Amino acid sequence: MLSFECKSYKESIPHQFTHHSIKGKNLSPAFSWHDAPVSTKSFALSIVDPHPVAKNWVHWMLVDIPFSAREIPEGASRTGRMPKGARELMNTYGEQGYGGPAPPVGSGAHPYIATLYALNVEKLQLPHDASLRQFLKSVDGKIIEEAATKGFYEEK
């Protein structure tokens, strides 16, 4: 069974992983996984905020992560430290790569759900500006197994 964890996000997401707009460092979180199905050819990853105010705000989408990869190091987004071949797509901020939490003040704690998909294909044919809907449609029918983790952040 696919095991997936975020080394950076805990129950409460530390401020350095939040977006620049709220004076965070916008560091992308570290993830690791193991026990991937042997038929896996690649992985895809998404971080989405499903809070009613956020309406499935995309914070990060990665595709074409090679089967040989078992981690994404902290701060890898836009630094050249991604697993070779992995592609970062646009987030809802309109930026390519990771965009940290920045929920509206007073909207309560927002959940940030990170999902790792073990896929039966090596590459997904998605443009860099693919929407969450396109991403989900692209992985549909190709998922061998998936695992998720989540953290929370609230701007007071």
Image (tube, grey):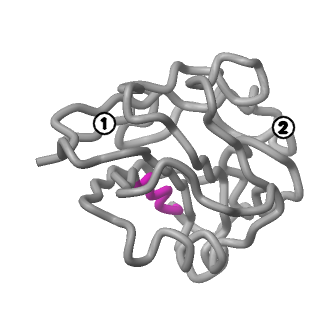
Query: For residue 91, what is the image quadrant?
Result: bottom right
Q: Residues within 10 Å of mark 1 (few under 14, many from 20)?
A: many
Closer to the camera in the image, 78 or 154: 78
Q: Residue at x 39, y 68 (%)?
A: 142
Asked if residue 88 lies left or right of residue 149, the reply is: right
Asked if residue 143 lies left or right of residue 1, the reply is: right
Residue 61 image position (x, y, % from top left) = 62, 53
- For the residues carrying marks 1 and 2, which lies nearer the camera in this image? 1
Q: Residues within 10 Å of mark 2 (few under 14, many from 20)?
A: some
Q: Secondary structure at mark 1?
A: strand
Residue 75 image position (x, y, % from top left) = 64, 21
Residue at numbered disc 2: 20
Residue 29 image position (x, y, % from top left) = 54, 31
Residue at numbered disc 1: 5
Span of residues in magenta: 110-115
Closer to the camera in the image, 104 or 97: 97
The answer, for residue 29, to whether it is visible in the render is: yes
